Amino acid sequence: MRNAQVETTRDSVGSAEAAGAGPTRRRLAPAERTPQILAAALEEFAERGYAGASMAAVAARAGVTKGLIYHYFPGKADLFKAVVRSCVQPVFSEAERFIAVFEGPKAELLRGLIEFAYARVAAERRERVLFKLIIAEADRFPELAAFYDAEVLSRALPLVRGVLRAGVEAGEFRPEVGDGAGLAPVLMAPATMASIWQMMLGEGRAPDLAAMREAHVDLVLRGLLRPGAPLG
Amino acid sequence: MRNAQVETTRDSVGSAEAAGAGPTRRRLAPAERTPQILAAALEEFAERGYAGASMAAVAARAGVTKGLIYHYFPGKADLFKAVVRSCVQPVFSEAERFIAVFEGPKAELLRGLIEFAYARVAAERRERVLFKLIIAEADRFPELAAFYDAEVLSRALPLVRGVLRAGVEAGEFRPEVGDGAGLAPVLMAPATMASIWQMMLGEGRAPDLAAMREAHVDLVLRGLLRPGAPLG
Amino acid sequence: MRNAQVETTRDSVGSAEAAGAGPTRRRLAPAERTPQILAAALEEFAERGYAGASMAAVAARAGVTKGLIYHYFPGKADLFKAVVRSCVQPVFSEAERFIAVFEGPKAELLRGLIEFAYARVAAERRERVLFKLIIAEADRFPELAAFYDAEVLSRALPLVRGVLRAGVEAGEFRPEVGDGAGLAPVLMAPATMASIWQMMLGEGRAPDLAAMREAHVDLVLRGLLRPGAPLG
Amino acid sequence: MRNAQVETTRDSVGSAEAAGAGPTRRRLAPAERTPQILAAALEEFAERGYAGASMAAVAARAGVTKGLIYHYFPGKADLFKAVVRSCVQPVFSEAERFIAVFEGPKAELLRGLIEFAYARVAAERRERVLFKLIIAEADRFPELAAFYDAEVLSRALPLVRGVLRAGVEAGEFRPEVGDGAGLAPVLMAPATMASIWQMMLGEGRAPDLAAMREAHVDLVLRGLLRPGAPLG
DNA sequence: AATGAATGAGAATTCATTCAT
DNA sequence: AATGAATGAATTCTCATTCAT
């Protein structure tokens, strides 16, 4: 028995009903439960960081018990990685589709990509927070850094370099741009930093997004286009 | 929280004597103890993040006992803020001096500043880690964001804008640059992101620093200089 | 409880399919399922002890799901008792047959029995482990102690005492041996302890089995035979 | 973290006062706390086995909080080993003193040792339970087996062999006894098994201790002494 | 007969913090 | 000023068991 001295963690009675969005409590197919848990975990991680997040809180947000979380994910670290993974996928699909579909001068494509990046920064606070988390936890989770490398940088940079190369080949961009190895990260950085600044300082105090976007596009096109080409 | 893989127990009986490598044990004036504790705390926070850091570990690194930490700082949060505060002073003095002393075309000054920024990225890991910490903890410690705003951004951006404005006035830069409000953060971002990437991925996998620097300088100068002006 | 060093999660989503090496999955008659589960449970209990064993692991070893275990056994305790019960039958039949069949001096019969006991120690690790389990769990499961009494001790001791009495009656053993009430357990103990030591320490570090057997036989015969009787 | 905001309900009256035997609650010197905790742990482990024991219950028995247990011992496993260690020491000291001090024929010394062993079995249930635990947990804690080897067997066997050798040298025992390598464990086994049987079956059903002792002494002396020597 | 989603009650352990010495 | 014993609450994770399917 051993009941007398029990100290009862008893996390937040009744919170299940109130906390999670859903009316859940009943058996659900994994295909429904998994995203529900992932969403709850994203919220919790985003708000409190990795170490600060608690599995109990994730469970409460999802409206299930801690045990169930462990039924679906081996542990906190795996849950975290699953969350990250589930968030990063759709961004790239979108960007890749954008590039594939685009018709017109490469300069316009590049402008479009930059504007797409700034647009994402403006929307989707969630995602940016996740990016912060990856930064913050990268050296405690070497796999996370590897993951960021594999799923973000190593997908994004070639995308940009592809556009640069295409522009050079089309005779739009100055040939010195070459394969864009050094330039691609320079082009990506401002929108990324804009995201971080927004996240840290809020819209009020962070550098103005629209102004950065304009200056960025302007600088890039002037810097890349052959002398005499029109800015679009 | 300290994950499962931790195998050292830092706080068991008798370990105190052995713990700190340092020679301390004697009564010390606050003026000496304080920096000692701050240094230890910087190490610990840098390695493990805010939530991951433990007061016991800070004490052990400092070669004192937990109790003493509380003698000097009201709590963990205050200790953290004190650490950050004590660390971000000297960088700007250097940049400001560089600008003040510089003689020659503004384009060269700008190039010098950019190169200075990349140089700092290459050195001083400690600093970058602190920057990471500020990012990671900013929304749990609003004062931290305010501090970053006041002591970093609000000092760095005007510096850059000053140079841009001077270049426009000197007739070196295109007049459309204006007051540089949008452009300054765009110029700062790549070196900053380079720092973050280096920190996350290490020298091996992060985008190459030298290549970024060259591409960055090249892009900026081509994008800013009046048509026909020499690149230097 | 399962300690910290455990690294496999045995129960996460989707693992069920992969878990059991066995081919089962189909509906089976109870007569086939029961021994399958008992075998799996024996392995698990033997390896991890009662408290350390997990129903999930038993299920996995048996290639079925936890639910099914509960279909066949009311709970963990019952499963454990069923395992023990199913395992201790055949040893005694053999010893009893040996005695019944034997012809020759009782001293030789006793020597034969002792050697039989040591021989069993050398073989059959499984059995010894079960004996260990009975010892370990006896006072949490009083029926288990009763079972050991009834099925092991109360069968073995009379066997030995029968031989002793027969030897006294035959004039081989000193009459002081009497009914062997005190002596029988003394005679049984060394082989039993040899088993325990082997189990705990392995063949390398445990007292040497052959040396014990020789010394044991020698001591017993010298101690029991009438003065002047040959040792055989 | 998630710690600062807690306001501590601070009720929890009584549990400490009521639970442990002691009146403790105040600061105590480690020299006093340690044995208190060890005693509590011995009780708990003895009653519930290693896996079945709970740190919370140990703490409650000791009248302290779980945290304090971890202040004194790195973890459950270490606590267990400390308990074992603290129980095994005094037995041997006693036996060693007994041998060192003894004067008279070696046969009498051996009889004395055997009787000492049975006497310990009769007293001190605690100790026997601990021995059971060592057996039960030995193969989950290889160090425990090693410990048993080092601290028990490797001390006890030489003790016995020393007496045997001395008896041979004194011309009391038959020279065939030799160095007692095989014989020593055979001599130790019955008292040890008597302990195990007592523990498992209780005084009522286990083989009678006094009868075993008499038969054991008798068998050993008759088996060892030179023909014609008096039994004492 | 069989599955596996879901629960709930602990388990070990960690840690910021307090306070007697 | 400094120690370190002691607390108490939270944290991650485990597991026997139930039950809808």
Image (cartoon, coloured by chain):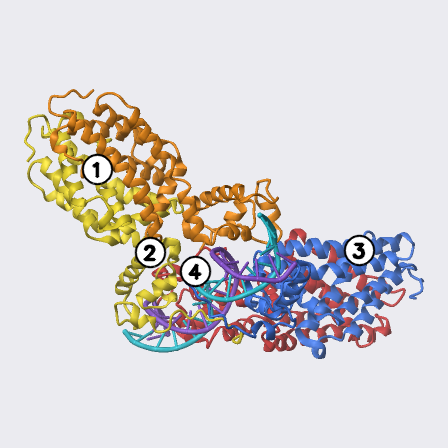
Chain colours: A yellow, B orange, C red, D blue, E purple, F cyan
Frontmost of labels 2 and 1 is 1
Q: Residue at x 73, y 70 (%)?
A: D124
Frontmost of labels 3 and 4 is 4
Q: Identify whether A145 is placed above or below D37.
A: above
Q: Identify whether A176 is placed above or below D86.
A: above
Q: Position of residue B106 (x, y in %)?
A: 21, 25
Marks 2,1: beta carbons within 8 A: no
Q: Mark 3: which secondary structure?
A: helix
Q: Nearer the viewer, residue B9 or C87?
A: B9
Let me know if residue D6 appears in the view. yes
Q: CA separation, marks 4 and 1?
A: 39 Å
Q: Tag 2: Cα neighbours inside 10 Å, few (<14), some, or many (≥20)?
A: many
Amino acid of disc 4:
Asn
Q: CA separation, marks 2 and 4?
A: 17 Å
Q: Mark 2: which secondary structure?
A: helix
**Dot 1 corresponds to which residue?**
B186
**Dot 3 corresponds to which residue?**
D159
Instruction: Identify the subunit bearing mark 2.
Output: A
Instruction: Identify the subunit bearing mark 4.
Output: D
Is the same chain shared between marks 2 and 3? no
**Dot 4 corresponds to which residue?**
D3
Q: Is residue B205 left or right of residue D183?
A: left
**Which numbered disc, 3 or 4, marks the residue that appears first in the sequence?**
4
**Dot 2 corresponds to which residue?**
A45
Q: Tag 3: Cα neighbours inside 10 Å, few (<14), some, or many (≥20)?
A: some
Frontmost of labels 3 and 1 is 1
Is the same chain shared between marks 2 and 4? no
Q: Tag 1: Cα neighbours inside 10 Å, few (<14), some, or many (≥20)?
A: many
